[in-house]
Image: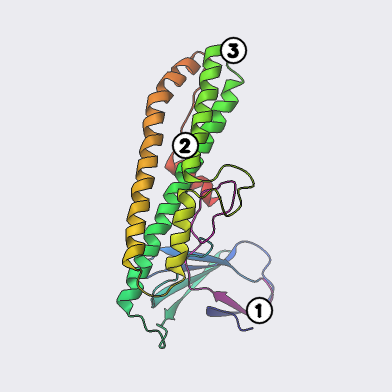
Amino acid sequence: GPKEGAAIAYYQKKRHIFGDFKFEIFDADGKLIDTLPGDKRKGLNRLYWSMRMKAPKVPTGASIAGGAFLGPRVLEGTYTVKMTKGKETLTTSLQILPDPLSLHTRQDREAQFATAMDLYQVLEAMTYTVDRIVDLRDQSKDLSAKAADESLRKRLLAFSSTLETLRNKYVPVKEGGGITGEERLRDFVALLYGAITNYPGKPSSAQLDRKEALKKDIAAADKEVETYLQKELPGLNQGLASLQLSLKPLSREDWQKAQKK
């Protein structure tokens, strides 16, 4: 069938062999929205952009979160396409127009986009929280094997086991839970996000209330994690200092760098 999305056509005299070849799409504020790989074959090529942002980052659990596979659809307006081919770059603009048959106003679409983006950021922040928990859980397990002192070893194992319990507030941790049964904060947010992104109109007041309630639940879980870490980390690191070892929480900056790789 016909390809969906905005078509970007380009012509290549010869096959591209060396260096980077990509198309980046920026919004009117110059913010990078999506990156697409170029097709290296020679001749006329056509690339299709879904007119969506990248899919959100979603915390990893024992099962897959339904609902968050697509990025939010962008609003109508002017976008910039930048082609990078080896050392050369070319830019062009791309106009996205509203669907003339749509029954929804620009205001409705703006409300939908803002709500989708809010949940998008909630999912990303939660992904960092869960990755940070997993990282500390694994560090403490590894360090427990190096601690000769029995009481320190037990404390490290208790710490890693409590972190696993805290992780289970956000994501399912039991293998084989499937889609049903063990739904957690991540799953509720992903489902709501999916419902918002799949409907091109204004979110309902029930959906907006649900979003605020979920954000409160996440804030409470985040606070519980922070309080626990502040209580336990200093003592554990004091015990580990004699071995010249320490537990280092993953910084947001390092996490973001790892995501880009």
Residue at left offset 30%, top offset 75%: 107
The residue at 40%/22% (across/down) is 234
Label 2 sits on what residue type? Leu
Name the residue that disc number 3 marks.
Answer: 148
Mark with earlier residue (2, 1): 1
Residue assigned mark 1: 13
Indicate the quadrant where residue 229 lies.
top left
Mark 3 and mark 2: span between their CA atoms?
27 Å
| Residue 85 visible (yes or no) | no
Q: Which residue is more in the foreground, 136 or 163?
A: 163
Q: Which residue is mark 2?
A: 166
Range of the magenta residues? 40-67
Above or below, comparing residue 50 to residue 117 in the picture: below
- Label 3: how many Cα within 10 Å (few below 14, some 14–19, many 20+): few
Tell me the mark number nearer the camera, choosing from 1 and 3: 3
Give the main secondary structure of the magenta stretch: loop
Residue 196 placement: quadrant: bottom left
- Specify whether residue 220 is painted magenta: no
Residue 139's x, y, as percent?
Answer: 55, 29
The local crowd at label 1, few if under 14, some if 14 to 19, many if 20 or more residues have their Cα within 10 Å, is few
